Amino acid sequence: MRKLASTADGSDNPEQIVVDNRFDGTVADAFKALPKRFGQVVELVDIDGLSYQEAAAVLSTPVGTVMSRLHRGRSRMKAQLTSEGYFRGGRR
């Protein structure tokens, strides 16, 4: 497997992060750690590709609730990834 180049500032190439198996595991762990109400929405919208309206219909909740839960779920996952050393565009 070829080694992908780092960026000019020495951080990992974004492609390298995405193909990194550790990253996959960290994302999966962050997803599993979400409370059910947030995890359901993240799964429906970000994994299954449903629109906010479709997710709201599946969950029998208002669209605003879906949007709020999605924001909170994504924020929690981002915090978990950050605590593991990942950040937008690279890894420490």
Image (cartoon, rainbow, N blue to C red):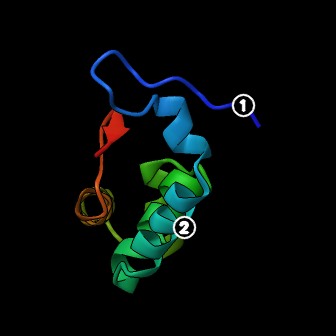
Q: Which mark is residue 2?
A: 1
Label 2 SS = helix
- Mark number, residue 51: none
Place of residue 41 in the rendered image (x, y in percent of width and height, measured from the top left): 43, 66
Q: Is residue 16 above or below residue 71?
A: above
In the rendered structure, which amino acid carries the disc numbered 1? Answer: Arg
Check the image and report above or below for 60 versus 36: above
Residue 35 against residue 66 in the figure, above or below: below
Which one is earlier in the sequence, the residue at label 2 or at label 1?
A: 1
Please count the marks in the image.
2
Q: Quadrant of the N terminus?
A: top right
* Residue 24 appears in view: yes
Label 2: few (<14), some or many (≥20) within 10 Å? few
In the rendered structure, the answer to whether residue 76 lies left or right of residue 20 reads left
- Please tell me whether mark 2 or mark 1 is closer to you in this view: 1
Q: Residue at x 58, y 49 (%)?
A: 20
Please report the residue visible at 34 percent of the width from the left and 31 percent of the height from the top.
Answer: 11
Identify residue type, mark 2: Gly
Q: Is residue 60 visible?
A: no
Q: Which residue is mark 2?
A: 25
